[in-house]
Amino acid sequence: MFSSDDTIVAIATPPGRGGIGVVRLSGACARDLVFQVVTRREALAPREATLTKVCVREAGTSRGSDHAIVTWFPAPHSYTGEHVVEISTHGSPVVLREIVRALVAAGARLARPGEFTLRAFLNARIDLAQAEAVADLIDAATPLQAQTAFDQLEGTLSTRISALDQSLLDLIARLEASLDFPDEGFHFIEPRDVVERVSELVSDLNELLSHEARGRLIREGATVVIAGRVNAGKSSLFNALIGRERAIVTDVPGTTRDLVTETMDLEGLAITLVDTAGERETQDPVEREGVLRAARARDIADLTLIVIDSGQVLTDEDRRLLESSSPARLVVASKADREPQWHMDEAVRVSTLANIGIGGLKDAMRRALTNEERLKDPAPLSNLRHVLLLKEARATLMRVSAAIAQSTPEEFVLVDLQRARTNLAEVVGVGSSDETLDYIFSHFCIGK
C-alpha cells in the first residue's frame, strides 16, 4: 500500500517536449520544499500564480534553469486534500528532470503511478468511482468517452449509488429495530413491505445495469476486422474508413501479409480497425502466416466486415468466409461503381474509388455494434468492476425476496441486506481492500 505520510513529487505533464511542463508536489512539506528550487523568498499566496525562476543547486553552487510559474494550493482545498505546489516551466524534459531531482534531494519522494489521485481518495476529496473516472477521462479517445468519464467524475454514478444505499440503510434499520423489541410488539416494517422495498431496489439496479453493454462499449471500444479474399478492396476500404492512406494498396495479390491496425472515432465509439491478409490458398510461408493471423483476428472481433468484390462472381474463398464468419458481421459489396455480378439483401454497397456508401457503412457498423440509431448520451455505468458489484448486489436482494416468501427469520434476511449494502459501498471504495486500491491506482499514469 502507498504511504501517505511523506511529500511526493512527479512530472504531471506527458513525456516529451512541449510548450509547458508541470512538476507537482503534494504533502505536508510541499510549500517548504519548493523554495529549494526557486529564487523567490517571499511567502506564496494561496491559489495565486507567482512568477519566479527555477534555480537548481549543485555542489554548493546554484544556477538558473528557467522561468517558472509557481502556484500553491493549501490543504484541504487542493486536488489531493494536502498542501500541493505546481511548478510550471517551459516543457523541456531536461529542466523538468532537474527540478524533480533537486526536490528529491531536498527530501521529497518520487510519486508512484496514481498516487496523487489515491491521496485525493484517501482524503475524501473523491470516491473510488470518481477516481476511476479520472483515469478514464485521461485515456478517453472520443468525445463520448470523455463525456461519460466526466459525468462519473462529477458524481452521477456515486449519487445513484448513495440513493440506493440510503434506501437499504433505512430498510436494515427498521428490521433491526423490530429485532431489538421482540416482546413489546413493535413491528417497524411488515414482511410484505420489505418485499416491496426490495423489489424497488432491484428495479433501480435493473435500470442502472440496463446501460451496462452500451457503457462498456463506450469505455472500452470495439475491434472491427476487415476480411475478404485477395484484391477484394479491403485495404482501400480500411484507408477510406480511417480517412488517410495507412495501408498499402496495389494490384498485386497478397500485398497485405500482416495485421494492420488503426483507431477511428465512430460517432463516439473508439474503434480498433484491423486490415487483414487476403483469404486464399498459398504456398508462401509469410502469406500463409498472414492468413492464419487473419482467421485468429476474426475469432476475437466484435464485428467483422466481409468484403466481396461486387464486380466478380462469388468464389469459393468468398463462400468460405460467409459460412465461417460469426453472426456479428456485415457483408460489404466493394467496387460498387462496377456492374454487380451477385446480390445479397444484407450487403452494404461501397466504392472507395467513387466515394460511394462509406457513410452508410459507418451507420451500419454503429447499428451492428450498439443496436442504436444514434449514440448521443453518455452512459451512467461503464466500468466492469462496478457492473460485477451491482450484479452481485441485485442477486443478493433477489434472494431476500425469495427468503421472505419462505418465512425465513429476519436475522438471515438482515445478513443478505448487509451483504448487498457492502457491494454498493465497494463501488465507491468504502471498505475496499488494499489489493483492490493498489490494482486500480497502479494503472494510472505517474503524476496523476
Image: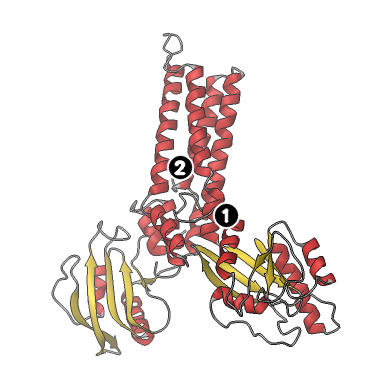
Specify which label sits upstream in the sequence, 2 or 1.
1
Q: Is residue 392 left or right of residue 327?
A: left
Q: Is residue 38 left or right of residue 322?
A: left
Q: Is residue 347 left or right of residue 99?
A: right
Counting from the top left corner in percent of width and height, residue 126 is at 36, 53
- Rendered position, 289 above or below 250: above
Counting from the top left corner in percent of width and height, residue 179 is at 46, 18
Quarter of the image holding residue 115?
bottom left
Extreme residue toward the front, this view: 339
Q: How many marks?
A: 2
- Rendered position, 86 above or below 116: below
- Rendered position, 431 above or below 225: above
Residue sitting at 42 percent across and 83 percent down? Answer: 16
Asked if the residues shown at circle 2 and circle 1 are in contact, with their CB atoms under 8 angstroms apart, the answer is no
Q: Secondary structure at mark 2?
A: helix
Is 81 or 279 nearer to us in this picture?
A: 279
Counting from the top left corner in percent of width and height, residue 121 is at 38, 54
Is 243 or 343 nearer to us in this picture?
A: 343
Is 200 or 92 nearer to us in this picture?
A: 200
Q: Quadrant of the C terminus?
A: bottom left
* Residue topped by disc 1: 370
Residue sitting at 56 percent across and 19 percent down? Answer: 409
Counting from the top left corner in percent of width and height, residue 380 is at 45, 49
* Residue topped by disc 2: 425
Please state which amino acid type lies under the numbered disc 2. Answer: Ala
Q: Is residue 439 visible?
A: no
